[in-house]
Amino acid sequence: MALKDQLIELVEYMQIQMIGFPNFLTKEQLEATGKVDSWSAKDNLFHCLFWAGNQLEILETLEKGEKWQDPENNDFEVINKDMFPQFESKSWEDGREMTEEKYQGVRNYLGRIDNDALQVIREERENPIWREILGMYVTHPMIHLWEQLTEAGKVDTVADIFGDKYHEMLLGLDDSDQFRGGVFYNQACLLALTDKLNEAATVLGKALKLTPALIDWSKEDSDLDALRELPEFKALYD
């Protein structure tokens, strides 16, 4: 399968998860009102959609042959705080509509371009366009959904959504060590959260071997706390 077709498949998959996200939350999470420094589940959804929309603007600007101009203040924390009031009064239904709009927009974009365009690296960027799309439309939302669903006690739901099927789709995109290491790392975290400890330690070993840059983070990542007393886990750092 061509890269763009694989990317479309993942974008479509994540769109379904974003729309279904509220169905798995507690009543308290659904009705929570967030603050600029303490987001609710709904705020997290709109945060993801804001950055997805920003990515779409970049893609469509470049597609026209124009240069994208980043804002003078490119501090993500400042932008996130400034963005908060835009969506503060929005409803879950607004979130559904915005999800459909932004995800349909990037799917339309992917339908128009070829695989070579996805490999272009923007000026002052390290990753190609396809990695930017993956980040803003798939892995960034994954992090926020994972966090909110875990908070709701829905670890099994996290395992269903971001389990084997999700990881297989990701692994098909790129065979580089760095990329595959990141995918295996998230898989190890999920296995640890669902008490598949020995398997988690094995997969974590694969991740750290492929991407040593993850070693320091793995020592403090709370998702891996269940592994810390395992001899197999300790042996990874000998």
Image (cartoon, grey):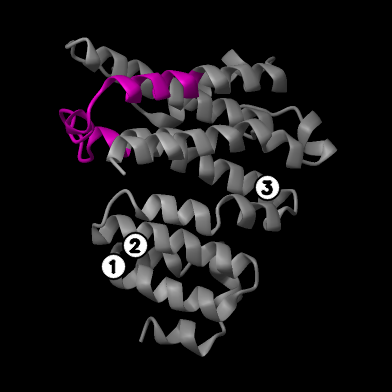
Whole-angstrom CA distance, mark 2 to mark 1, is: 5 Å
Is residue 197 left or right of 61 when viewed as pictured?
Answer: right
- Determine the residue located farthest toward the front in the rendered image: 1
Q: Where is residue 146 in the image (x, y as percent from the top left)?
A: 59, 48
Disc marking residue 149:
3
Tag 2 and tag 1, C-beta contact below 8 Å:
yes
Mark 1 residue crowding within 10 angstroms, few (<14) / some (14–19) / many (20+): some
- Which element carries disc 2, helix, strand or loop? helix
Whole-angstrom CA distance, mark 3 to mark 2, is: 24 Å
- Taking the spot 57% from the left edge, 68% from the top edge, the residue there is 191
Q: Can residue 40 be seen in this view?
A: no
Is residue 45 left or right of 220 when viewed as pictured?
Answer: right
- Which residue is label 2 attached to? 181
Image position of 196 with respect to 57: above or below: below
Region of the chain picked out in magenta, as a range: 102-131
**Towards the viewer: 179 or 80:** 179
Is residue 85 left or right of 132 when viewed as pictured?
Answer: right
Q: Earlier in the sequence, mark 3 or mark 2?
A: 3
**Towards the viewer: 186 or 215:** 186
Tag 3 and tag 2, C-beta contact below 8 Å:
no
Q: In which quarter of the image is residue 230?
A: bottom right
Magenta highlight on residue 214: no
Image position of 196 with respect to 111: above or below: below
Magenta highlight on residue 124: yes
Disc marking residue 210:
1
- Taking the spot 43% from the left edge, 63% from the top edge, the residue there is 185
Whole-angstrom CA distance, mark 1 to mark 3, is: 28 Å
- Taking the spot 39% from the left edge, 76% from the top edge, the residue there is 205
- Taking the spot 57% from the left edge, 13% from the top edge, the residue there is 86
Mark 3 residue crowding within 10 angstroms, few (<14) / some (14–19) / many (20+): many
Q: Position of residue 80 (x, y in %)?
A: 49, 26
Q: Which amino acid does the dot numbered 3 rest on?
A: Leu
